[in-house]
Image: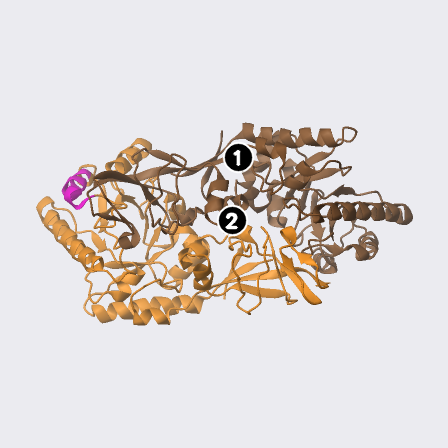
Chain colours: A orange, B brown
Amino acid sequence: MAYITINKEHFAHNLCVIQEHLKMINPQKNIQVGAVLKDNGYGHGLEIMSNLAQQNNITSVFVKNYEEAIKIAHKFDSVTFFYGIAHKKITNIYPTIHSFNDIFNMERIIGDLSGMGVELKVNIGMNRNGIELRDLEQYIEMILQKNMRLIGVFSHNGYGDEIDDEFQRECDLHDILKEKVRQLSRQLGFPLPRFHSLSSSCTLRAKYSDDDLVRIGIALYGYLTNEIEIESAKNLKPILKLYANKISTRVLNPAEKIGYGGKSIIHEKTAISTYDIGYGDGMYRVNGSKKVLLPNGKEILPRSSMDCFSCYDTANEICVIDDAAYIASLFDTIPYEVLTRLSPFIERRII
Amino acid sequence: MAYITINKEHFAHNLCVIQEHLKMINPQKNIQVGAVLKDNGYGHGLEIMSNLAQQNNITSVFVKNYEEAIKIAHKFDSVTFFYGIAHKKITNIYPTIHSFNDIFNMERIIGDLSGMGVELKVNIGMNRNGIELRDLEQYIEMILQKNMRLIGVFSHNGYGDEIDDEFQRECDLHDILKEKVRQLSRQLGFPLPRFHSLSSSCTLRAKYSDDDLVRIGIALYGYLTNEIEIESAKNLKPILKLYANKISTRVLNPAEKIGYGGKSIIHEKTAISTYDIGYGDGMYRVNGSKKVLLPNGKEILPRSSMDCFSCYDTANEICVIDDAAYIASLFDTIPYEVLTRLSPFIERRII
């Protein structure tokens, strides 16, 4: 059976790369690393990744929705989910507020929201999610009026990867946001929430931060997709490998064909095997429009099937992915997509 | 929260298209429809699809592996799984034998295999999985010697979609296979197993069959990818739709940018919303290299994110996929891949 390995030493190493950088850019402040475990731990497996985060003393994590949050809440001090609403009040699970509707919808389901912790997302230029900076006071008043706990106020810098002035502009807007929250805290008398904004690439390119937390996703998994030169990004190590096992082997003669539509044709007498990973497992379908190689240099012969692929090899086991960036470059995408689409039904093993 | 609807009437209709065709090509024989529910029901959801199959009086189904089989075995007379081995003897769960190793590996785990039902897969030209026709007798002798029950002998015609003489050549080889099994049954004195070979496209293009069963996957879900003209394929109706819900709305001014790297730029003052489907949910990532439209004609603005996309719309809910063939054509693939990669964590609803 196919399986995925997750390298715990690489995970600890990647975390260390981030922590070292944080110490360097602000030795006075102990900026925490919050692990982003959303989308089934970027496809690595929520269960296994939350265990690794816990073992590495990470106390704050971020997931996609309430369903992910309740699975792992017992392992952390705080679990913030980015989208959708909570169905119950749970002390250390914090929904993200993007609009008044989020509050009204939770009130409709849960009733009294008093005591519930929430984080407020503020748009600083990606123009995607979150409330507008100009509406900040109104939102905070509503949260206080409903006796909710404002755990955090955060933004998301969408220009971490690009050579673009927008990166700095968004950093400046985040500072303005923080100053505004501090003023409101004094004025309205609520405890100062935690602040965070920086993702993996933003963190590693930042020269200074006095945030309480950074939200690290892709770098913990060993990748970065920066256009700009970030020295420490080169030290990141992918933590995931995907392995397939052999289904069967046969020896074929010249002119014999393989797979759907007989797309691959044999040129000389060869032993060929089928391995149990296909596009139904989340690997990209290989249809012959590009050549896709395995880490051992052998080709995945077109066309690959839903549950298997053929290859000129006879090994019992074969590594299919050891670097998601290679597959991403072939399929005009980024490692994030290659990783998140890996089927959660594939067995995960810690190594 | 994003969700998927599965249309039960379309499913029943698609089943009917197949059944009508089977009656036409062999009115004497009641050829059964076996439903292929592998890979989480081609991404539609194993639970929901197995319920629909059961409600439509389908009694034989096919899944990917033992893990899928045990989840649904109580609903059917027979559940055959294509890959990997069984971990326990269960009366109505049948592993597929592709090699002697499958038998040895099961013996190592389970011990005595007597009484276990198995199906034997024979290669008739795809040169992918299954044993060779010349080894048939040897395999059947081994199965009998271990007192296993030979439930079925089957092949897979890999040329259903193509205008190619191979289709007929493989049909002929399947007939030879069946004749050989019948001879061995008389000679060695074992009950005749069931025979099957035809997939969706092969079934609908076949002019005759006397198999016991056809294995129908993609057509039940409402698609076919045939190059050759198959009249009845035009009547198939996709059963799945994917819907996203709104996260937030804002009004943007000319020159404002949206999403990672500010890839989309606003030309006139517009209301824009974010919806809760991204590539982490199994939708393809939209990076701007091609224009991707929603069923309502609006564009998914590049770049889409892991958990959301932006769009010039303000509706609370929006349909993202109503025809997987459209997405497949944009991303150089087939509906199977678009469907199987949909995250199993998205809620499924029968309509």
Say which quarter of the image contains residue A142: top left
Q: Tell me which residue sits at (57%, 61%) in the image.
A: A300
Instruction: Please name the residue that numbered disc 2 is placed on.
Output: B333
Return the mark for residue A162: none
Residue A320 at x, y = what percent? 54, 62
Choose mark 1 or mark 2, whichever is in front.
Answer: 2
- Circle 1 residues within 10 Å: few <14, some 14–19, many ≥20: many
User: The residue tagged with tag 1: helix, strand or loop?
Assistant: loop
Q: Is residue A125 magenta?
A: no
Q: Chain of mark 2?
A: B
Q: Amino acid at mark 2?
A: Thr
Tell whether A291 sits left or right of A106.
right
Residue B342 visible, this angle? no
Tell whether B337 sits left or right of A65.
right
> Which image quarter holds the N terminus of chain B?
top left
The magenta stretch is A132-142
Q: Are marks 1 and 2 on the same chain?
A: yes
Q: Is residue A136 magenta?
A: yes
Q: Tell me which residue sits at (45%, 62%) in the image.
A: A324
Q: Compared with residue A320, is residue B350 higher up or lower down, i.e. above or below?
A: above
Residue B292 visible, this angle? yes
Instruction: Please name the residue that numbered disc 1 is placed on.
Output: B238
Residue B340 at x, y = what percent? 52, 46
Residue B140 at x, y = what percent? 81, 53
Q: Amino acid at mark 1?
A: Pro
